[in-house]
Amino acid sequence: MRILIVTETFYPATDGICTRLAQMTPRLQAMGHQVLVVSPDLGIQEYQGVPIKVMDSFTFPLYSSRPWGLPSKKMKKVIENFQPDVIHAVNPFMLGTSAVKYAQSLDIPLLTSYHTHMPNYLDHYNLSFMKPLLWDYLRKWHQPADYNVTVSKTLQAELIDQDICTQAVLPRGIDLDLFHPQNYDEKLYREWTFGLPGQKLLVYVGRLAAEKDLDQLVHVFEGRDDICLAIVGDGPARQDLEAVFKDTKTTFTGFLKGQNLAKAYATGDAFIFPSTSETFGLVISEAMASGTPVIAAESGATLEQIIPGQTGTTFKTGDKTSLQASLSILDHEDILARMKVQARQEAEKYSWQAASQRLLEFYESARIIHQAKHVMRHSSYQLSLGQQFLSLFELNE
């Protein structure tokens, strides 16, 4: 199968979408399929044997850490040259909308996937009044798909409620070899706990932005003198957050990748995740694979990954009393030890190979549905011609 994947972002950018695509595209190619990725210009034209077609890009002043693509007429030529059997528009919002448009005009099977829950982001930027307009825009680019998927059952239900037919949920995948409890690093632990005895280390991994609710983590230090926090990642809110956490035992590491990231996950006593804006939050599963219990703000996507009391615990977002109460698991070494084992065991159920195979099945479904639509349109056209022909006799009677 010839698979064209058009995405608003790709490796080496760091987020859940990039992780999925970076893991799945080489595997699809290894299965014998031809894959072409189309993305903004992120500085590479090939990734692990997968060719990348870069498009004209620009830098958005309010989010300058990565380039963005725009809708482009050049997409039509890319599609015609590659002759895909299926087009996958990943989170179509700007560049991806061109893929949707030309898949329709060129009559090619189309799968769209919904990853970033932008309507929820508006609440964090005092723009909630724009939600109806944004939902209209998202419907415009997802409804034409032959097959639409998303990343959690909770989000699937919400999309269907918003009149965006969503047939399936992308399974999670985890790099179980990279993210592993054996990556615990005693030297790093001492560094991030400032060489102080009797400390507990909380680790966060992710983008630093307003919608992540990271500022509420400052409350973990209230009433306790044994908490240290490592914030792994970068983003537009970093400077503000550094001011919020000034004079606390907090380390801002910036982006980490590969083995350094694996060490960060495995070295924490617990992984802490305050965001409820996530469509899934793949970092939760990566922490679990690292044998690190999760303390997370309660949301549908969170509860699809962790089992409270077994692989972690939850707290109510915006409720500092609930947040502080959730830290009590740190005071029980036996509970933490059990959760570490159970977190790893739960994560071992998921592999990127299985997730890639499932995505391939979704592509096949898109092709089958597209063909069925084609037959129905053709049949409807023939029926219409027949009705017109019969009407001529009726007029002559």
Image (tube, rainbow, N blue to C red):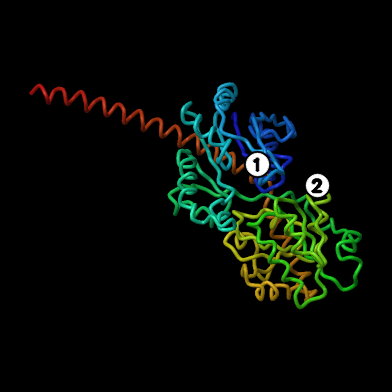
Residue 70 horizontal/vertical position (percent): 59, 34
Between marks 2 and 1, how big is the CA–CA gap?
Answer: 27 Å
Amino acid carrying label 1: it is: Phe
Figure quadrant of residue 75: top right
State the residue position of label 2. 258
Q: Which mark is residue 60?
A: 1
Q: Nearer the viewer, residue 347 or 308?
A: 308
| Residue 209 rendering spot, x and y as whole percentages | 67, 54
Few, some or many C-alpha atoms within 10 Å of disc 1 (few <14, some 14-19, many ≥20)? few
Query: In the rendered image, which quarter is residue 92 located in?
Result: top right
Pinpoint residue 9: horizontal percent, then vertical percent. Answer: 65, 40
Contact flag, marks 2 and 1 (Cβ < 8 Å): no
Residue 187 image label = none
Front label number (2 vs 1) = 1
Placement of 191 over or under 11, stated as above or below: below
Going from N to C along the chain, the mark reached first, 2 or 1, is 1
In the figure, is residue 59 to the left or right of 156?
right
Query: Which residue sits furthest bottom?
Result: 223
Above or below 256: residue 221? below
Q: Residue furthest left?
A: 397
